Image: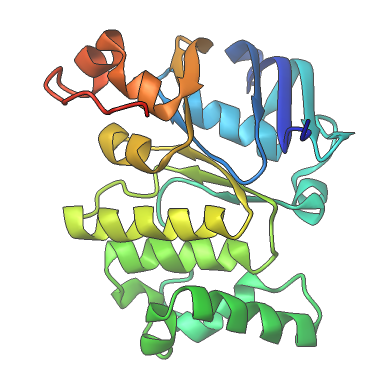
Amino acid sequence: MTAPALEIMELTAGYGEVPIVRDFSTALPPGSITTLIGGNGAGKSTLLRAIYGTNRIFAGHIVFDGEEIERLAPWARLELGIGFVPQGRCNFPLMSVAENLKMGGYSLAAGERREAIERVVETFPMLRQKWSVPAGNLSGGEQQILETAMVLETDPALLLLDEPSLGLSPKMQNEVFAAVRRIAASGVTVLIVEQNVHGALIISDRAIVMELGRKFLEGPAVAVRNDPRIREAYLGGNIKEVATG
């Protein structure tokens, strides 16, 4: 039996003295895409930040690639192979695409950085087309792809994505989702928080529903998408069922 890429056990996490995520447990299969679903304040982004190490963990364990990481600093988790693309724009808007990619590989040796940039440009050809364009002049979807590429330069085994399609046109949302599929197909495990629940569930293998900081439901994405409670709460109640076979 294949070991999970990431295992979370009875995790309680939050900010300051306030727990947001409570007693949360799950295990992500290697190379899978898992979508976190929940309303505002459900704890989705807090969970991603806890995995990356940028908020407080009150209790529980996080095991990545067989190693407990809950006490490690974010830079140490990055070195182990965890990449995080937070919500909102996180590039250098006055710098060109090429310069942003160089910044994305700042922790790599010069030769490794050149190879990493070439690798992500092959994955996302748009970056070469926009090579000299300031990042701030790109469309929202193009900026999202650039920011994801910057994180992918470190060759993560686990990629955390927080609302990658937020504010994008339907066309650009589809391009971002297609990029996520390509990333997972290369062997990267993806955990995604996404406001476009319908689109995210279509590309996902598994889904987790959170309510008030706790896990409410978990299972194959198709089963979660077909659950009447989820369809009513997050899909408008009018999405046709998807065949499970």
Q: Is residue 166 above or below residue 206?
A: below
- At horizontal 42% and vertical 81% (from top left) the residue drawn is 125
In this view, the residue farthest toward the left is: 238
Q: What x and y, as percent, mark residue 129?
A: 36, 88
Q: Quarter of the image containing the C terminus?
A: top left
Q: Observer-nearest residue: 20 or 182?
A: 182
- At horizontal 29% and vertical 19% (from top left) the residue drawn is 226
Q: Is residue 15 above or below residue 162?
A: above
- At horizontal 70% and vertical 52% (from top left) the residue drawn is 157
Viewer can see residue 93: yes
Q: What x and y, as percent, mark residue 183?
A: 53, 58
Q: Is residue 118 left or right of residue 111?
A: left
- At horizontal 49% and vertical 26% (from top left) the residue drawn is 44
Q: Is residue 154 above or below residue 167?
A: below
Q: Quarter of the image containing the N terminus?
A: top right
The image quadrant that residue 9 belongs to is top right
Viewer can see residue 38: no
Q: Observer-nearest residue: 195 or 33?
A: 33
Q: How many marks?
A: 0
In this view, the residue farthest toward the front is: 245
Q: Is residue 191 above or below residue 159?
A: above
